[in-house]
Amino acid sequence: MPDQKAARRVVDIITGTWQAQALYAAVALRIPDHVAAGHTTDEALAERARSDPDGLRRLTRLLTAMDVLEATDTGYRLTATGELLRSDAPHSMSDMVRIYGEEFHRAWGAVVPAVRTGTSGFQHAFGMTLHTYLRDPGAGARFQRAMNAGNVFFPDVLDVFDFGGHHTAVDVAGGSGAFLATVLARHPRLHGILFDQPHMVPVATAHLDAAIGSGRHEVRSGDIFEGVPAGGDVYLLSRVLQDWDDDRCATLLSHIRAVLPANGRLLILERVVPDHGETLLPLLYDLHLLMAAGGRERDLAGYRDLLSAAGLRLESVHGLALETSLLVAAAA
Ligand SMILES: C[S@@+](CC[C@H](N)C(=O)[O-])C[C@H]1O[C@@H](n2cnc3c(N)ncnc32)[C@H](O)[C@@H]1O
């Protein structure tokens, strides 16, 4: 007798990617935007999305079953999930869905050569690293918006770490400044320095100016593997170590250690691989990082080793939303 339960499990896993691609199609065709604008029937949506009516109807039927749309007497309305996919939603995840459906989907297509060679799927699929690809300002800004969509754990940091005794936060490879803005908004006496590549300077400046005004922050450009700004007493490293191999991480952490004062702290935000594999998300992201930047998620022992090689020690670990953790480190 075939094991029906096991067969069902295989089918559920292999069709999972179809759900992701259906969600991607919804965003690419701007279905959530059209529904929000009052085009709620299949006919109206097909017209707005310039799509085949039958294909569109089959997509909306699946989106309804996936709890993205809800059928009403007069058409569809957006569920809470669908609302997040509007391009103008306050915490829109539409750019994240697009990047996962386009670039990352293509990179995952190279999963076999990536695992065989240890070279990123992105490199195999696009002929360049993700970091090179993101130097294009349009792609870089879109990618950062996608990162921001996954930011729901930033406010949690404020509940578990006391910034009260600190004067200057340095956000190393801080991207668009969303994390630094969250911290500075809550702590009006704190100053901030955001450090990233030159093309991120206008993006971060605009974001920080809009979020907290001018006067309490500066944005500097440079290379994290050459050095990091001195003068901070709390250094932030959010979703950065995940992109790099151990040697690169050691270089970066040594630069931070060189400027970290005795009372300073380093805050690392990453998904930590659990010891017993009891939860899938960090493991999925670990393999995803091989497909994307060619990096990795690490377990706690891995972070302890990286930190101690750079003269730092892990002081505490705090669980945050979306199975992300805050690792607080200090000089050893
Ligand atoms: C995955 S993003 C994380 C951004 C931000 N910390 C966050 O959590 O949203 C990685 C960041 O590293 C920056 N980066 C990559 N290589 C860099 C380098 N050599 N020097 C400075 N920044 C770099 C990128 O521009 C990007 O903003």
Image: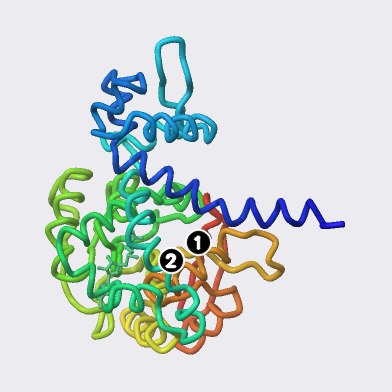
* Label 1 lies in ligand 1 vicinity (Cβ under 8 Å): no
Q: Looking at the image, is mark 1 or mark 2 earlier in the sequence?
A: 2
Task: Name which residue type carries label 1.
Answer: Leu
Most foreground residue, 133 or 259: 133
* Dot 1 and dot 2 residues touching (CB under 8 Å): yes
Q: Is residue 232 above or below residue 305?
A: above
The residue singled out by tag 2 in the image is 267
Dot 2, crowdedness within 10 Å: few (<14), some or many (≥20)? Answer: many
Q: Secondary structure at mark 1?
A: strand
Q: Is residue 217 above or below residue 272?
A: above
**Alpha carbon separation for disc pair 1 and 2:** 7 Å
Task: Name which residue type carries label 2.
Answer: Leu
The residue singled out by tag 1 in the image is 326
Residue, x 24% and y 85% (percent of image)? Answer: 226
Q: Is residue 48 above or below residue 226?
A: above
Q: Locate residue 48: give its quadrant.
A: top left
